[in-house]
C-alpha cells in the first residue's frame, strides 16, 4: 500500500470510450496524474451522431433472445465493436469475454445482466490496456429493491479499494440487487457508480470525463456558444438539471453531496480545459447572481379561483389531496389571495382534466377552475439571486416585455435560489434567448 495525499476517481463516459483511439486518450489522461487511482468506465457510446450505443445494442439483442428470435446478427454488432477495440489495443482476451456474454444471452440471465455487459467488457479491456486491476462492481456495489444504493456498498468499497501502485478499473452502471442478481441503475448510471466510489474511497475529487468543456449556462441548441460555468454548487446544478439541462445523471449528486467531494466535469477531447467544478459553495461576485438558465415546455396550469381563498383554513391541503388522488405530481404551485395555480405536465394531465376539474370543484366549493395549456417554464438558477433580486426581476421582466412575451405565471421561492417564469410554450426559446442576453 502507498500513501497518496489526493485520491481521484476518474469516470469516463461512453463517448470518451467509443473506439480504440479514444480509449488510448482516456488511458493517457489516467496515466498523466498519479492521483487518478480509481477509474470507472461506461460502455462504448456513439462514435458519430448516427451511431448506436453498445448498451442499446445489447438491449436489442436481449429483446430478440427473450422473444425466442435469432439474436446472433444483433449480437454481432456488439462483438464487432469490441473485437475491433481488442485488436487495436492488443487485448485478445476480449474474444473469450464476448463468448461468455453470448452464452449468457442464450441462457436468459435477465435484461439487467445483459445491459451491464457493455461496462463489464469495457472495464476489462481498459484494465488490460492500462495495466490496471479490474474490480467487478458486483463485489463493491449493492442496490436496494427500489434501485437506490445500499449503504453497505461504502464499507465494501473502503475495505477493498486501498490506494495502491496499480490503478483500479471498475465498470459503472450496475451492482448486485437484494436477490444477489445483477441490477443496473437508471440509464446514464455510470455517473452514479463514479459518485459512490468517490464517497467510498473518500476521494479528494470526482472527475467526470465527458465530451464537453463543462457545463454551459444555457442550452447550446438555443444560444450560440453559451458560456461555460467554472464553478457551481450542488444545489444549483440540481435545479438546472431538473429544469431541463442534462449534464449528470440526477442521482449522481447525492453521494458526493453528503461528503462534500467536488465533482469536476472535464473534456476527454480537450484535457487542458479545467472544466466545471461542482461543490458545496462558490463565491458569488457582484452581478453574478444567476448561474444558468434552463427551460422546458409541455406544462399546463390548473387555475383554481375562489374569493377569500387566503382566509380559508386548510384549503391548500384539500387541493393537493385532489392532485394526489389523481396521481398528478405538480411542478410549482404559486398562490395569490384568491387563487392558486397548480402546474403539472401536459403528459400527466392528458385524459384526466375533466375528472380533475370536477373533483376540485367538489373539494373547494364555489370555485372557478380554468386550465391553461401549452405553458413553457423558464428557470433562472443561482444562489446569488436573493441578494440581487430587485435588479434581476426588473431586468428579466423588461427583457421579456421587449421581446413581446407576456409572463403567464411567476414563482420565486423564499430560499431565493431560483425564479420560475411561465410563458407560452412556443415562445420558450425566444424567452430563454432574451433573458440570457440580458442577465448572463
Ligand atoms: N451504458 C449505460 C447507458 O448507456 C450507462 C452509462 O453510460 O452511464 O445508459
Image (spheres, rainbow, N blue to C red):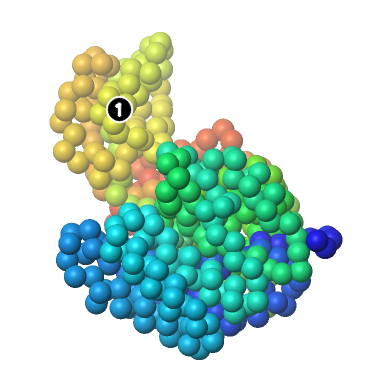
SS at badge 1: helix
Asked if one can make out residue 356 in the rendered structure from this viewpoint, the answer is: yes
Would residue 267 appear left or right of 88 to someone viewing this image? right
Q: Is residue 165 above or below residue 146?
A: below
- State ligand 1's quadrant: bottom left
Residue sitting at 38 percent across and 73 percent down?
99
Q: Nearer the viewer, residue 92 or 176?
A: 92
Q: Quadrant of the N terminus?
A: bottom right
Could you say where residue 305 lies in the image, as x and y percent from the top left? 29, 24
Would residue 194 appear left or right of 319 to someone viewing this image? right
Residue sitting at 43 percent across and 79 percent down?
95
Residue sitting at 27 percent across and 24 percent down?
325
CB at mark 1 closer than 8 A to ligand 1?
A: no
Could you say where residue 110 lies in the image, as x and y percent from the top left? 33, 54
Q: Name the quadrant containing residue 165.
A: bottom right
Q: Name the quadrant containing residue 274.
A: bottom right
Q: Which residue is mark 1?
A: 323
Q: Nearer the viewer, residue 246 or 414?
A: 246
Would residue 311 appear left or right of 161 to someone viewing this image? left
Asked if one can make out residue 234 in the rendered structure from this viewpoint, the answer is: no
Crowd around label 1: few <14 · some 14–19 · many ≥20 (10 Å): some
Residue sitting at 25 percent across and 16 percent down?
363
Could you say where residue 38 lies in the image, as x and y percent from the top left? 66, 63
Would residue 428 appear left or right of 216 to someone viewing this image? left
Q: Quadrant of the C terminus?
A: bottom right
Q: How many marks?
A: 1
Q: Is residue 430 above or below residue 408?
A: below
Q: Is residue 344 above or below residue 263?
A: above
Q: Nearer the viewer, residue 27 or 108?
A: 108
Could you say where residue 194 lies in the image, as x and y percent from the top left? 58, 57
Amino acid at each position: 500500500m502507498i500513501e497518496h495525499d489526493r485520491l481521484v476517481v476518474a469516470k469516463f463516459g461512453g463517448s470518451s470510450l467509443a473506439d480504440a483511439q479514444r480509449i488510448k486518450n482516456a488511458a493517457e489522461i489516467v496515466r498523466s496524474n498519479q492521483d487518478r487511482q480509481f477509474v470507472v468506465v461506461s460502455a462504448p457510446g456513439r462514435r458519430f451522431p448516427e451511431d448506436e450505443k453498445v448498451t442499446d445494442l445489447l438491449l436489442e439483442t436481449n429483446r430478440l433472445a427473450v422473444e425466442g428470435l435469432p439474436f446472433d446478427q444483433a449480437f454481432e454488432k456488439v462483438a464487432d465493436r469490441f473485437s475491433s477495440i481488442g485488436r487495436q489495443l492488443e487485448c485478445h482476451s476480449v474474444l473469450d469475454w464476448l463468448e461468455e456474454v453470448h452464452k449468457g444471452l442464450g441462457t436468459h440471465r435477465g435484461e439487467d445482466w445483459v445491459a451491464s455487459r457493455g461496462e463489464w467488457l469495457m472495464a476489462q479491456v481498459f484494465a488490460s490496456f492500462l495495466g490496471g486491476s479490474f474490480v467487478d462492481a458486483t463485489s463493491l456495489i449493492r442496490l436496494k429493491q427500489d434501485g437506490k444504493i445500499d449503504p453497505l456498498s461504502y464499507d465494501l468499497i473502503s475495505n477493498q479499494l486501498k490506494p495502491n501502485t496499480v490503478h483500479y478499473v471498475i465498470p459503472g452502471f450496475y451492482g448486485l440487487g437484494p436477490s444477489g442478481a445483477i441490477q443496473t441503475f437508471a440509464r446514464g448510471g455510470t455517473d452514479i457508480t463514479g459518485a459512490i466510489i468517490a464517497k467510498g474511497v473518500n476521494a479528494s475529487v470526482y472527475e467526470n470525463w465527458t465530451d464537453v468543456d463543462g457545463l454551459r449556462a444555457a442550452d447550446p441548441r438555443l444560444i450560440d456558444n453559451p458560456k461555460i460555468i467554472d464553478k457551481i454548487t450542488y444545489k444549483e446544478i440540481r435545479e438546472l438539471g431538473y429544469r431541463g439541462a442534462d449534464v449528470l445523471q440526477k442521482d449522481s449528486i447525492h453521494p458526493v453531496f453528503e461528503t462534500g467531494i467536488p465533482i469536476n466535469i472535464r473534456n476527454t477531447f480537450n484535457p487542458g480545459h479545467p472544466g466545471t467544478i461542482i461543490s458545496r459553495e462558490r463565491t458569488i461576485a457582484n452581478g453574478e447572481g444567476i448561474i444558468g438558465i434552463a427551460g422546458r415546455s409541455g406544462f399546463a396550469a390548473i387555475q383554481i379561483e375562489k374569493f377569500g381563498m387566503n382566509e380559508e383554513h386548510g384549503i391548500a391541503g384539500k387541493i393537493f389531496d385532489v392532485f394526489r388522488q389523481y396521481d398528478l405530481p405538480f411542478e410549482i404551485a404559486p398562490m395569490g389571495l384568491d387563487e392558486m395555480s397548480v402546474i403539472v405536465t401536459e403528459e400527466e394531465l392528458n385524459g384526466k382534466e375533466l375528472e380533475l376539474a370536477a373533483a376540485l370543484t367538489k373539494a373547494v366549493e364555489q370555485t372557478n377552475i380554468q386550465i391553461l395549456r401549452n405553458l413553457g417554464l423558464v428557470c433562472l438558477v443561482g444562489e446569488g439571486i436573493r441578494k440581487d433580486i430587485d435588479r434581476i426581476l426588473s431586468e428579466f421582466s423588461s427583457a421579456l416585455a421587449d421581446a413581446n412575451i407576456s409572463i403567464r405565471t411567476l414563482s420565486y421561492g423564499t430560499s431565493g435560489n431560483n425564479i420560475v417564469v411561465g410563458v407560452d410554450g412556443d415562445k420558450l426559446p425566444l424567452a430563454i434567448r432574451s433573458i440570457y442576453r440580458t442577465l448572463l
